[in-house]
């Protein structure tokens, strides 16, 4: 079949498939169910037509036998399709029967013009039921069956049978009735050329349709990938709640007052001096290694990376609403970032140390710009976290009094006393050492 079995499609059935559902299976694709219904409809039509001819008293017993045989063959094929759910098997049965009927009918009755339609109809039907590639076999089989009839015409035996007795054939010749119009070269050539031309046109049209459908399917996949990529990019630039608001209204102004947010700011000590003595590629590679490790830790803790600025790294928690675990997760992140920095320092053999400042409180956040827009957070909470980072000793995490008060029952601290911070005056702060049970 042209398509592989898939889950039951939600697409509404059309044409014969709306009423004739012989052989349908739960795993069939839309195209498979449509093809089974088309074949079933053709078989039912042949049964009805043959039944009408069977009731015609003017037809000979032999022709009645052909009609009865066609009815039986179609019923058997429908039973096979219903029982096995295999369209390929059912189509093989009916095509084999059709080839047999062509050979028998043309050798006995001869060429009556309309009977040459059958070798054209079934190859065409094969294109849309078992697929273009498999259909070529049946076109060849039907054409060879006609060539066979034409080739053996002169060598048929002189048999008689009472079923063939008519006014025009009083002796009852089986293959050599006096009024028989044999399949000659002209009729054969015309039929083969007509079959090939008709088949070629339908084959080309159908394969082009399949190609177009495949192109559309690939475009949908690529569009879905591009959409997912843009979604990931947007989520990487903005917090999820902010991204959703921008998607709903791209022209809206994003500006939020955050009542209680936790801010972490990390900075690589003396990185400017270190970078001056390194090639540019090495500087970028080192920063990428450090910040990639930090990114993985932020994602693991479920926090929001806000931005990087040079060798500074900023993280926030509580943007979409503060939770009871935000501060704990931020403290764990700060400790894990120091561990990650030490790992990189040992692996790269660089004088790499990180200072981290941590504070919580009020802040303002929003999306700024229209070209290369970015999300940022401002306010005293951010400024104090930055000052604490600047005052921290290399390789340590310094936190504010507010953070210490909230975490002192679960974490270990080392008092740093009061420190003069630029723009803040003397501020009491603490070094975060680890969990009490760690």
Image (cartoon, rainbow, N blue to C red):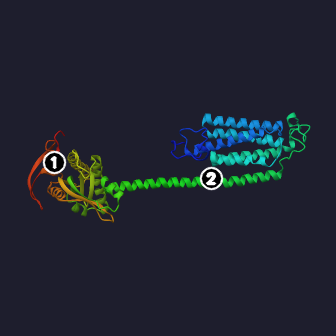
Marks 2/1: CA distance?
71 Å
Q: Which residue is mark 1?
A: 432
> Percent from the top left, x then y, of residue 79?
65, 34
Q: Which residue is mark 2?
A: 206
Q: Describe residue 153's horizontal placement relative to residue 355 as left or right.
A: right
Q: Nearer the viewer, mark 2 or mark 1?
A: 2
> Percent from the top left, x then y, of residue 59?
82, 39
Dot 2 or dot 1, earlier in sequence: 2
> Percent from the top left, x then y, of residue 41?
65, 43
Q: Describe the element under mark 1 as helix, strand or loop.
A: strand
Q: Describe residue 177's horizontal placement relative to residue 336 as left or right.
A: right
Q: Describe residue 57's horizontal placement relative to residue 437 as left or right.
A: right
How many marks are shown on the rendered structure?
2
Q: Residue at x 15, y 51 (%)?
A: 399
Depth check: give the residue in front, 326 or 247: 247
Depth check: give the residue in front, 91 or 268: 91
């Amino acid at each position: 079949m042209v398509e592989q079995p898939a889950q039951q499609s939600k697409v509404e059935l059309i044409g014969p498939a709306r009423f004739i559902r012989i052989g349908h299976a739960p795993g069939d694709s839309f195209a498979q169910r449509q093809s089974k219904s088309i074949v079933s409809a053709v078989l039912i039509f042949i049964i009805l037509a043959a039944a009408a001819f069977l009731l015609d008293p003017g037809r000979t017993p032999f022709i009645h036998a052909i009609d009865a045989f066609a009815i039986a063959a179609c019923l058997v094929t429908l039973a096979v399709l219903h029982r096995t759910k295999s369209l390929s098997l059912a189509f093989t049965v009916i095509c084999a029967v059709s080839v047999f009927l062509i050979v028998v009918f043309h050798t006995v009755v001869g060429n009556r013009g309309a009977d040459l339609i059958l070798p054209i109809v079934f190859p065409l039907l094969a294109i849309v039921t078992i697929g273009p590639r498999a259909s070529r076999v049946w076109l060849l089989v039907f054409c060879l069956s006609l060539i066979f009839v034409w080739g053996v015409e002169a060598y048929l035996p002189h048999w008689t049978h009472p079923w063939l007795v008519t006014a025009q054939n009083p002796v009852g010749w089986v293959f050599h009735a006096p009024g028989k119009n044999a399949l000659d070269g002209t009729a054969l050539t015309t039929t083969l050329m007509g079959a090939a031309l008709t088949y070629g046109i339908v084959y080309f049209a159908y394969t082009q349709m399949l190609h177009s459908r495949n192109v559309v399917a690939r475009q949908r996949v690529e569009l879905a990938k591009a959409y997912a990529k843009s979604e990931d990019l947007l989520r990487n630039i903005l917090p999820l709640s902010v991204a959703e608001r921008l998607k709903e209204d791209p022209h809206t102004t994003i500006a939020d007052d955050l009542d209680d947010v936790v801010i972490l700011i990390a900075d690589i000590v003396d990185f400017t001096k270190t970078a001056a003595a390194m090639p540019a590629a090495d500087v970028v590679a080192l920063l990428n290694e450090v910040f990639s490790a930090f990114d993985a830790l932020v994602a693991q803790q479920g926090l929001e990376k806000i931005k990087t600025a040079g060798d500074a790294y900023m993280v926030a928690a509580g943007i979409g609403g503060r939770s009871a675990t935000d501060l704990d997760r931020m403290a764990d992140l700060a400790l894990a970032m120091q561990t990650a920095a030490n790992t990189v320092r040992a692996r790269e053999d660089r004088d790499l140390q990180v200072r981290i400042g941590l504070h919580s409180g009020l802040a303002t956040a929003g999306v700024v710009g229209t070209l290369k827009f970015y999300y940022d957070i401002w306010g005293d909470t951010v400024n104090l976290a930055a000052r604490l980072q600047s005052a921290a000793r290399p390789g340590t995490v310094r936190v504010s009094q507010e953070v210490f008060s909230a975490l002192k029952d679960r974490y270990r601290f080392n008092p740093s006393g009061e420190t003069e911070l630029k723009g803040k005056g003397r501020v009491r702060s603490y070094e975060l050492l680890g969990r009490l049970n760690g």
